[in-house]
């Protein structure tokens, strides 16, 4: 490579000035973009914070032990969310038990075992598409397949299965991303020692991918916890004045699965129900329920961050 | 013999030069024999062309050549690394002595091959575990659970890799806290711990500074008393310093193979001479 000069110094000087102008112009553009981004962010954060603040101001004073331990009632001041939060916890339990193992298994299979070809491409495209399907479609599917097709009824089990279907794509995609982000030289190093695929999977890939997988699972769960449409579609009750049978008991065999087949309500449905009442007192109840739901969601996200932080630290040492 | 060779390297430039020189028969004991070996990547590229090469027992064999000549591809064939990616194909034989097992035969399991042939990579790649667990990894893969056995093997391997003194006080600390040169010697210890029949080194010093490189070179020289080493290097002085035999490859062919001193002082093929005198590469 050689550079040809034509001997005219002025050309070089002019070029330099033009380059400086271009840089200055780019800098001004950067400033504009940064300013616009800042403006959008401040406005949207302010809106979100004022929404949360409004909810808090109206709902927070209503939350006390009675509110958490009472069943719903026709009288607003005596109504509580006991059946709703118990229902939410139980449905989330079913969702987690179904979505996490199936989603992680599917993600690991697609990334590590499946032969790359048109079939795996087809599955990959469809998994991504499923993540974008409106949640009410899942509700309709569950109503037709689980409630009527399999005659499972409008139970906690069906709600958990429906929400598990809904968040399955999120878990699968997160698992694949986490596995894909493991450096190739680590995998080759393990194979180079004579490890077989099973050993590489369990001793190297899953431990390294665990923070990403868990984060994906919890992000999925915190989406599921606020879902209302599919649960309404499968016909969850809105007025539940009883608790499902306890999963653990003092008598043998100590664990019971009868609760899976009970009717239920969940926090968002309880909230939806109260918002649609004309009396203002019920609106306060709805706001208080909203605060509890927000607190649960933030708690889930907090756990996700904490797990990620802990595992990263543990993994380093 | 001449016919089959000229057909395969129909390179326009190669026509003017004499064909590759077949390795002379060895009198010393062999650990492996590469016979008429060819390798094809999934896209059909023939990356290795009909290579015949002996690998001497408990000696260092260096493979040199310009970038893209197939030296790493050949090395990675020796422990079936190419099997990790679909569509690659081997042809010919790689015979492990004295048993006479063909490593790329139809009934040979790549995982079993890798249990016998260890490997160290271009970039140090310790696992995100403690120093101790890194060295123990190969034993755990082999199902060894006895702590006393593992303790002994870990210490032995770290000593053989000349890193025991630097590692003994922090065996249970993360391997990531070591320097790059220490990490690479740790990776050598990790490969040595299960006592491989052959140790493959794929440009092990290319990511290291000169002092760390010198330490690894000393180590390789020392190791050749006890283990068979095959090393790929882009550094000709390194090959000259540490190896007993040198193979020069060009465009997937083994152009010349011989005693290291002969290759570097009295190359018989003009291409070898051009390369070692720095006329291309």
Image (cartoon, grey):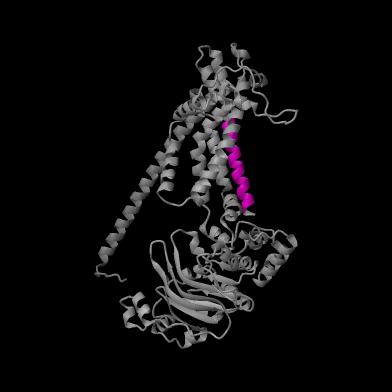
Left or right: where A84 falls relative to A275: right
| Image: B69 above or below A285 | below
Which residue is depicted at the point 59% across and 67% down?
B184
Q: Which of the 4 quarters of the picture holds residue B169?
A: bottom right
Left or right: where B168 falls relative to B241: right
Q: Which of the 4 quarters of the picture holds residue A33?
A: top left
In the depicted view, which residue is nearer to us: A251 or A108?
A251
Q: Which residues are magenta?
A: A295-315
- The quadrant in which the N terminus of chain B is found is bottom left
In the depicted view, which residue is nearer to us: A25 or B79?
B79
| Image: B131 above or below B37 | above
Image x and y of residue A101, in percent: 57, 41
- The quadrant in which the C terminus of chain B is found is bottom left
Image x and y of residue B176, in percent: 61, 59
Q: Residue furthest bottom?
A: B266
Is B172 magenta? The answer is no
**Does residue A63 appear in the picture of this structure?**
no
| Image: B138 above or below A99 | below
């Amino acid at each position: 490579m050689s550079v040809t000069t034509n001997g005219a110094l002025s050309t070089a000087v002019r070029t330099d000035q033009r380059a400086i102008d271009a840089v200055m112009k780019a800098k001004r553009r950067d400033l504009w973009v940064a300013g616009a981004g800042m403006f959008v962010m401040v406005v949207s954060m302010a809106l979100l914070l004022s929404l949360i603040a409004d909810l808090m101001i109206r709902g927070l004073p209503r939350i006390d032990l009675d509110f958490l331990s009472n069943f719903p009632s026709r009288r607003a001041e005596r109504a509580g969310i006991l059946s709703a939060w118990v229902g939410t916890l139980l449905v989330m339990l079913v969702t987690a038990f179904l979505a996490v193992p199936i989603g992680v298994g599917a993600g690991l299979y697609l990334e590590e075992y499946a032969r790359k070809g048109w079939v795996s491409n087809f599955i990959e495209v469809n998994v991504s598409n499923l993540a974008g399907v409106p949640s009410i479609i899942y509700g309709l599917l569950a109503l037709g397949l689980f409630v009527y097709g399999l005659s499972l009824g409008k139970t906690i089990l069906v709600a958990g299965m429906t929400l598990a279907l809904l968040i399955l794509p999120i878990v699968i995609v997160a698992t694949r991303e986490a596995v894909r982000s493991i450096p190739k030289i680590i995998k080759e190093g393990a194979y180079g020692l004579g490890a077989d695929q099973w050993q590489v999977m369990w001793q190297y890939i899953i431990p390294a991918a665990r923070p990403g997988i868990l984060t994906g699972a919890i992000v999925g769960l915190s989406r599921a916890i606020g879902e209302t449409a599919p649960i309404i579609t499968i016909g969850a009750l809105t007025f539940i004045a009883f608790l499902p049978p306890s999963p653990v008991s003092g008598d043998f065999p100590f664990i019971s699965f009868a609760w899976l087949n009970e009717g239920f309500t969940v926090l968002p449905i309880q909230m939806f129900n109260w918002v649609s009442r004309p009396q203002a007192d019920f609106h306060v109840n709805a706001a208080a329920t909203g605060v509890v739901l927000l607190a649960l969601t933030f708690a889930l996200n907090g756990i996700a961050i904490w797990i990620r932080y802990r595992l990263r630290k543990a993994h380093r040492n | 013999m001449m016919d089959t060779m000229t057909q395969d390297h129909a390179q326009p430039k190669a026509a003017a030069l004499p064909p590759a020189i077949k390795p002379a028969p060895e009198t010393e004991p062999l650990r492996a024999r590469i016979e008429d070996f060819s390798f094809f990547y999934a896209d059909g590229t023939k990356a290795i062309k009909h290579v015949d090469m002996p690998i001497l027992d408990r000696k260092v064999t260096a493979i040199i050549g310009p970038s893209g000549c197939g030296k790493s591809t050949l090395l990675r064939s020796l422990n079936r690394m190419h099997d990790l990616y679909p569509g690659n194909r081997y042809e010919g034989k790689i015979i492990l002595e004295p048993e006479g097992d063909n490593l790329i035969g139809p009934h040979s399991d790549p995982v079993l091959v890798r249990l016998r042939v260890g490997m160290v990579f271009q970039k140090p790649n310790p696992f995100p575990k403690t120093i101790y667990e890194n060295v123990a990894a190969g034993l755990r893969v082999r199902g060894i659970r006895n702590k006393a056995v593992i303790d002994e093997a870990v210490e032995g391997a770290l000593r053989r890799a000349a890193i025991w003194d630097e590692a003994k006080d922090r065996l249970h600390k993360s391997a990531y806290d070591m320097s790059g040169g220490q990490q690479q010697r740790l990776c050598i210890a990790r490969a040595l711990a299960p006592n491989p029949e052959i140790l493959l080194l794929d440009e092990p010093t290319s990511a290291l500074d000169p002092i760390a490189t010198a330490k690894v070179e000393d180590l390789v020289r020392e190791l050749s008393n006890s283990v068979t080493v095959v090393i790929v290097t882009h550094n000709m002085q390194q090959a000259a310093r540490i190896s007993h035999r040198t193979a020069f490859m060009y465009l997937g062919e083994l152009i010349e193979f011989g005693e290291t001193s002969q290759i570097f002082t009295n190359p018989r093929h003009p291409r070898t001479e051009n390369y070692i005198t720095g006329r291309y590469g």
